[in-house]
Amino acid sequence: MAAAFGDALGRTPAFTQVAFTDVYDRTYRADLSGRLRSAASGIDLLARLRHDRMRLFAEARLGRDMAFSASALRRHDVTPVVAQAMSPLLEDAARTIRYPRMAVTASWRGLALDVSHGYGVIARDWADVHDGLGPAAYPEALFGGTDSTALAVGMPLGETTRLRFAAAFEAPAADDPAVLAVAGEAGSRRLGAVTLAQEGGHGGWQALLGGIVEKGMVLGGRTNGALKLADGAATAFIAWSGDYALERLWQGKHPWRLAAGMVAAVTDPTAATDSLLRHPGTLMASPFHAEIATWDMLAAGDRLHLGLSQPLRIEAGSIAAHVPVARDLTAPGGRFRFAAQRLSLAPSGREIDLELGYRRGLASGGALAADLLLRRDAGHVASENDMALLVRFEKAF
């Protein structure tokens, strides 16, 4: 990354804060911060990168039970693009993307309401640049913009338990014609989730039940072209995570803590139109992780941990590919005959990762850490085993 982006040419931060308390013990605070950063790039694609960021935050606490806050973020990126390998027409093109974000939070006696809205759109008119080249000439990552709105309501169910409802809607920034010209058909997704969490002195846990309905995309990836998987998808998932201090189970010399989590998801893609892939089946996935850690084992402040995990893997799922299986030589032109061939999407192996790590502070400041990682069926490919040893040095300047 350092070679790719080069040295920073300039960074100018600015910060202003105003706060006061009235005679009724009500507190008001306003923050205004900004940053301008320019950087040179060592790669041909990004010749110069500039960030302008401005953030406004306001907060009011009206007594002990009521609070209100609002924030706005404006980020302005300007990136001249030099991409001769893609097209000579892009040599003098520039990309300007704005990232406004707005959020409002209100709370009253433990009941919290969060509303946020944000989007990133392309300000430059690309009509003259992409005319005649078509969407395939441009990588989607350079152009994608998103409109998103989120709403969340949280409420306490006792001293240590909290319930939260959340919903969100996300769609491409369709107000810029360049986005649709590059990304193809517009997609959108709706998300909803219910979270139940509990926290205590010895640990806590969180359970989440939710769903995602997508149109024009599958699990966040756009679907277009002759090999698109589906026109959309509906996903239901349940997740659980927790951590627990083990002092209540036994009184040892060193503190021990156990953390674990899992996800079970089912995705039902819709049938794809104008694609060689037909009749997608239901996809099932279930990653998990677990870790046990202890402190002060060999020295004060050190940490020893052992972790076991499985990355995201498709447990079950298949798709039918509409492919040629024969050729009729008696027909004019030797017409091909097509048939559906069912293909499994489940990988041949199951990756299991085992990690052993140790971190220890140094007397001169900083810390030294080492991790040993063993992977069975790396990448979920059968018999592809892998091992890595990572050593890192940490020091704050």
Image: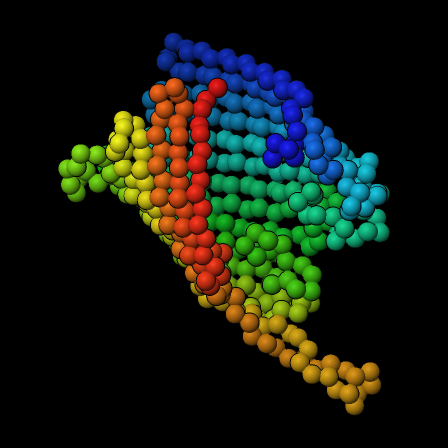
Q: Whole-percent x and y of residue 325? A: 66, 80
Q: Whole-percent x and y of residue 39? A: 67, 26
Report the coloring of the rendering. rainbow
Vertical arrangement, residue 107 with respect to residue 286, above or below: above
Name the residue at 50% across, 49% down. Answer: 191
Name the residue at 72% across, 42% down. Answer: 176
Q: Whole-percent x and y of residue 346? A: 49, 65
**Residue furthest out toward the bottom:** 330
Viewer-closest of 176 and 44: 44
Viewer-closest of 396 and 321: 396
Is 137 on the left-hand or right-hand side of 168?
A: right
**Residue furthest out toward the left:** 251
Vertical arrangement, residue 281 with respect to residue 1, above or below: below
Viewer-closest of 52 and 389: 389
Vertical arrangement, residue 194 with respect to residue 264, above or below: above
Q: Whole-percent x and y of residue 88? A: 84, 43
User: Residue 233 appears in which quarter of the rendering?
Assistant: bottom right
Name the residue at 77% across, 38% down. Answer: 82
Name the residue at 71% across, 53% down. Answer: 184
Total numbered labels placed on residues in the image: 0
Is 242 on the left-hand or right-hand side of 106?
A: left
Which quarter of the rendered picture does the N terminus lie within? top right
